[in-house]
Image (cartoon, rainbow, N blue to C red):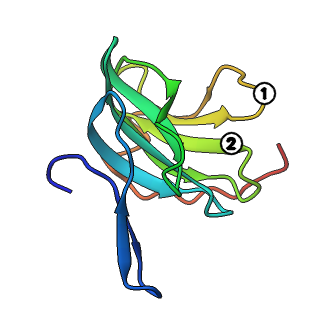
Amino acid sequence: TWDGTIWIYDVVRGTRARLPRGKTANLDYLTWSPDGERIAFGGSAEGHPGMSLFWQKADGSTLPEVLIGGGPEKAAMGFTPDGRSLLYRQFEKPDGLWLMDLREKREPRRLIRYPAMTNRAAVAIPWLSM
C-alpha cells in the first residue's frame, strides 16, 4: 500500500490480513516463493542504512528477516522454480541482476550488469540447475 504495509488478500474466503512489519519501512517490490509460503521484498530496516532485502512467512507468523542489509536500492524479482535462490535487481553500483542462494547463504552473484539492463526491465532467464 501507499504506506509500505503488505496486505494478503484471500479471494476465496474474502478476507485480508496485514503482515507484521517489525522495524521495517518503505516496503516495495514483492515476489512470492513458488510454494506460496514466503514473500520476498525490498525496503529499509532500522540499523541498516540504505535499502535491504527481506523475506517473511506469508501467513504473518514471523517478522521480516533481513536477507541483505542496507546499501543500494534492491528489488526482489522472483524465486528460482525450486525456491532455493532469489533473483533481485540492484539499482546502484554494483548494479545489475543478482542471484542469491537462500539455503547455503553464499555471496550473491551478479548475472547481468548494467547497462545491459534498463531500469525495472522485465528479464527472462532460463533456469539452469544450481
122 over 71 or under it: above or below: below
Residue 66 left/right relative to 43? right
According to the picture, the residue beneath numbered tag 2 turns out to be: 85
| Quadrant hosting residue 100 | top right
Residue 32 left/right relative to 28? right
* Furthest residue toward left: 2
Residue 128 left/right relative to 99? right
Amino acid carrying mark 2 in the image: Ser
Residue at (21, 57) in percent of width and height:
1
116 over 128 or under it: above or below: above
According to the picture, the residue beneath numbered tag 1 turns out to be: 104
Residue 81 left/right relative to 122? right
- SS of the residue at dot 1? loop
Question: In x, y percent, where is residue 80?
Answer: 68, 53
In the depicted view, which residue is nearer to us: 77 or 3? 3
Q: Earlier in the sequence, mark 1 or mark 2?
A: 2
